[in-house]
Image (cartoon, grey):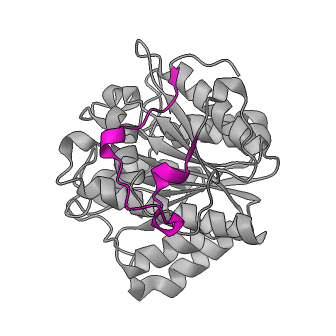
Amino acid sequence: MELNNYEVTAFDTHAMRIDGDDSRENRWHQIIRIVDLRKDPVLKNGIVLLGFAVEEGVRRNHGRPGASTGPACLRDVLINLPAGEITKGALIDAGTIRCAAGDLEQSQQQLARCVAYIISNGGFPIVLGGGHEISYGHFQGVKKVRDGKTGIINFDAHFDLRTPKPAGNSGTSFYQIAMDEQRTGGSYHYLAIGIQSISNTQLLFDRAQTLNVRWISRDKFHPMYATKNDEVLKRFLAEIDHLYLTVDMDVFAAAFAPGVSAPAFNGIIPDAYFLAVFDALINSKKLVSMDLAEFNPAFDRDKCTARFAAELIFRAVQSKHKQIKTGL
């Protein structure tokens, strides 16, 4: 596969922790397999990390810079996570896509190609952002290789349904996807969780209704409303064939996720209720791909956000590895 603005991962050996020779002491850097997607590697049954070190969409959306360093910072935390029962080679690092001369559209096209390659070759992609412009390219990649209805669940304080003016940015991905689906006669299935009135104009709420977007507001994402929320999630999952999950780290309260492009003082609390919902989604057999967006190391505190994001990735990797290992 031909790729521009792509680089193979090289871990910082000074940051690697080694506890001993017993395989039960292994950490991710001791079991991960580094591949070059330009050489068409074998990925079958692999859980594949792919970086999207791009913030051009954030810049166009007048956000604060720094998200492009997210993948590298996340990897610094991820490589020292305990391997547990993950076998050597089951976890794969497939490098990073960058952005040259502000050409976001090329980066998104390359992301789509990489995601499509990973899925079509039997891998499960976990894409590390990068701004939320990640979603437009990511979804395109899923659609290239998965027939049927692909639904999007987005943990986010924002709808990201703005119109490109004239080009796309970090706040337009899900509008662009909706327009693409209309043009091709497809169906649009989008559920946003964590939406805040303080973060979206009335026009965006109206547009969400026009496009039949479902959402659970930040106020309603609470154990008190668990039964109703479960019904919303079950109905949504029942109407789709494949699930693409995206987590915008700015959905969480800034006390837990300060290192984001647009911090929310009153966002979702990552408590047992959130983790139960998240775990249910990553355990879904319909989940084909996921990403984390808007992590901005420039504003993180003691790697708090990086460690939180790593925890979510860790849970996803453990879940998918168990599914692959057991054939469930």
Residue at the image position 67 percent from the left and 30 percent from the top:
113
Report the quarter where the C terminus lies.
bottom right
Q: Is residue 102 visible?
A: yes
Residue at horizontal 31 percent and vertical 53 percent from the top: 306
Residue 170 rendering spot, x and y as whole percentages: 41, 36
**Nearest to the observer: residue 268 or residue 215:** 268
Residue 240 at what x, y percent from top left? Answer: 73, 61
Q: Is residue 29 magenta?
A: yes
Q: Is residue 136 left or right of residue 200?
A: right
Q: Quadrant of the N terminus?
A: top right
Question: What residue lies at 71% left-to-right and 63% top-to-bottom?
Answer: 286
Give the quarter of the image for residue 72.
top left
From this viewpoint, which residue is outermost toward the front? 21
Q: Position of residue 44 (x, y in %)?
A: 76, 48
Image check: 250 left or right of 289?
A: left
- In the image: residue 299, left or right of residue 129: left
- Magenta-highlighted residues: 6-33
- Choose between 283 and 136: the one closer to the eye: 283
**Residue 100 percent location from the top left of the image:** 44, 15
190 relative to 37, above or below: below
State yes or no: residue 48 in magenta: no
Q: Quadrant of residue 247?
A: bottom left
Count of labels shown?
A: 0
Residue in view at x 48 percent, y 84 percent = 226
> Which one is in front, 73 or 231?
73
User: Of all residues shown, which one is farthest toward the right?
Assistant: 147
Q: Is residue 63 above or below residue 226?
A: above
